[in-house]
Image: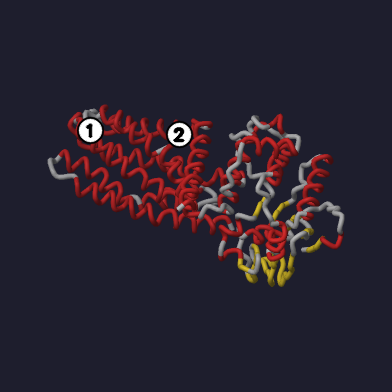
Amino acid sequence: MSNIWKLFTAMAALIKRDLSLVLRRKNDSLATLFFFAVVASLFPLGVGPEPKLLQQIASGMLWIAALLAAMLSLNRLFADDYQDGTLDLLLLSTIPLPLAVLAKMIAHWLSSGLLLSFAAVLLALQFNLSGESVWILFLSLLLGTPIFSLVGAIGAALTLGTRGGGVLLSLLVLPLLIPVLIFGAGAVDAYQAGMPVAGHFYLLGALFVLSLFFAPLAAALSLRIAIE
Amino acid sequence: MSTTSSANHLEQSLQLENLTCTRGGKVLFSGLTQSIAPGQLLHIVGKNGSGKSSLLRILCGLLSPTSGQVKWTGQVIRANPENFNAQLIYLGHSPALKGDLTAAENLFSAALCRQDTLSIKEVEVALAHGGLLPLANKKVRTLSQGQKQRIALAQLQLKPRKQFWLLDEPFNALDSDASYALQQSIQQHLQLGGIVALSSHQEIEIDQPSAKVRIEL
């Protein structure tokens, strides 16, 4: 029992360290948020300022924008550590690698997905979404964005040390995240169409639990391969 | 108490069994067999690109050998990595420091990966040993290469002492004082029954030449 507790405190300390690094380089997180806001603001300019239409596409659009914004910071997840050599420390850690990787994933979500979910609420107002729709959008993002970090980390580990890793990462990861996008954006659409949304949330939850279990294992394995 | 700990040390030997490493289609070394007992220094020498770093990475399990295996206390290191890692300090050819963290924070973060809990006092003692106390609260990004290397080496002074030191070109970028101090701490570590494996172009002078095992790649 005390061993498990020790592991938890070590993971918490890892998360804290990563977050303090994020705070010292706020630019990365700010760039993610800014990108999200800009993409979301470009849509009305592209498709025209039709309030009805914008209200209809808002949820899907915000989901896509959040997905792309999350991709932006993903390729840095392990690349920085790889470059300065601290990734070796993580691989030679006494914390089992999947758990250490999970800690990094959590830190990544806290510094990107969580912020994006809150920013989405503000941006949703811009599209005249009703109060309840905004809630559903927020909750679906809160459940969906961790999957971006979890699955994205596998891609980040696989593309570590490759040239143009960022593009390759998106090509690898985006197709895997299609189900998340479908059920996430679908939840708001279903609500707006007056249909029950529980099913969407159950499926999102299932995807979350599935990736929570497998992604750290897969990412840890990919890291070991990438580092050789 | 001291007898049990020395008995433990006796078992904690490192065995290289028939190691072969191939990188990029080129065989770097093959059939490398060696046993290193507590108190012994493994000095790896060789030209640039001869596979010194690869061998060190194989010894800590970051790289898997093309064939052969590395054993620690009779057990293949990859079989129980957490147990092996708990007794290991590996300093690679880059100092493995976060530029945005201070020197002290970097030591905390390195100890964190080994799940050692440190007090601020202990970190200060380790830094003071290398004369680095004035740099404790400076961001590593602003320091020189030699200073970074010395901060990385300050990990060796942290408690609890690790049995197995694995140092890749530790004398790089060090001035003569720091380099002398490092030789001293290697010497001391060997006397305490530790094992050191390092690659270096310079000769390492230790009191008992018989404790030195040399591998030429």
Q: Estimate the x, y position of residue A28 in percent, counting from the top left.
A: 48, 34
Identify whether A196 is placed above or below B42. above
Identify whether A111 is placed above or below B156. above
* Spatial separation of the CA atoms under disc 1 and disc 2: 27 Å
Left or right position of B172 against A55: right
Local secondary structure at mark 2: helix
> Which is nearer the eye, B43 or B15?
B15
Identify whether A180 is placed above or below A33. below
Left or right position of A16 against B74: left
Query: Looking at the figure, which quarter contains the N terminus of chain B?
Result: bottom right
Q: Estimate the x, y position of residue A117 in percent, counting from the top left.
A: 33, 36
Task: Return the chain for callout 2.
Answer: A
What residue appears at the point 28 percent right and 49 percent down from the top-left corner? A204
What residue appears at the point 72 percent right and 69 percent down from the top-left corner? B32
- Displayed quadrant of residue A32: top left
- Displayed quadrant of residue B2: bottom right
Local secondary structure at mark 1: helix
Residue, far left: A194
Looking at the image, tell me whether mark 1 or mark 2 is earlier in sequence order: 2
Q: Estimate the x, y position of residue B126 in percent, counting from the top left.
A: 70, 39
Dot 2 amino acid type: Ser
Q: Do callouts 1 and 2 point to residues on the same chain?
A: yes
Dot 1: few (<14), some (14–19), or many (≥20) neighbours within 10 Å? some
Which residue is identified by label 2? A29
Dot 2: few (<14), some (14–19), or many (≥20) neighbours within 10 Å? many
What residue appears at the point 49 percent right and 55 percent down from the top-left corner? A220
Q: Estimate the x, y position of residue B191 in percent, counting from the top left.
A: 79, 55
The answer to whether residue B18 shows anywhere in this view is yes
Residue, far front: B1
Which residue is identified by label 1? A54
The answer to whether residue A168 shows anywhere in this view is no
